[in-house]
Amino acid sequence: MVKRYIKRKGKTYGPYHYKSKRIGKQVKSIYVGKEENGKIKKRKHSKVQKVHEAKEYHFKDKRVHEFKLLLRKADSLLIENRVAEAMQVYTELTNLYKKIKDEKEKLELYERARMIYDRIRLQSG
């Protein structure tokens, strides 16, 4: 078994294990593998990727927050018996709901929006 190291741009990579095997009249080096207990390098995220993820989280959080504010507004309008305005707010809710991508969050918000819808139907009919 032979260990080989590769040097590139001042860094040393390896050890890579090879074994020698005679095939016909020639001796061939056959790659066996890299050493098992070598360090596992963590994949680093680029700054651009981190900023993109932070913005995506912010937008998701912002949409959910805005949705909850609209729910409260519709609820207060229904308490004041202003059904027509509550219907307009509910329309805004449905448009914002379409923009939310997180399925778990959507399910929770759907249930709350459904309660508002049922109250609008009861008070208008």
Image (tube, rainbow, N blue to C red):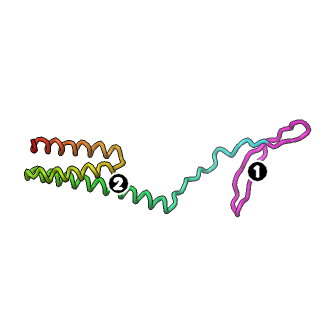
**Count of numbered labels shown in the rendering:** 2
What span is colored magenta in the figure? 1-29
- Judging depth in this view, the residue of 116 and 32 nearest the camera is 116
Residue type for callout 2: Lys
Find the residue positioned furthest to the top.
Answer: 24
* Location of residue 57 by image quarter: bottom left
What is the residue that sits farthest to the right in this orientation?
25
Q: Depth-wise, is mark 2 or mark 1 nearer the camera?
A: 2
In the picture of the structure, the residue carrying the numbered disc 1 is 4
Residue at horizontal 64 percent and vertical 49 percent from the top:
38
Residue situated in front as seen by the camera: 28 or 78? 78
Q: Where's residue 122, x and y in %?
A: 11, 41
First along the sequence among labels 2 and 1 = 1
Residue carrying label 2: 60
* Left or right: where 46 falls relative to 100: right
Tell me residue 119's x, y (percent).
Answer: 14, 43
Q: Could you say which is closer to the camera, residue 15 or residue 26?
A: 26
The question of residue 62 being in magenta is answered with no
Work out how far the residue at label 2 is from the one at label 1, CA to CA, in angstroms.
Answer: 50 Å
Residue at 40% x, 56% y is 56
The residue type indicated by label 1 comes to Arg
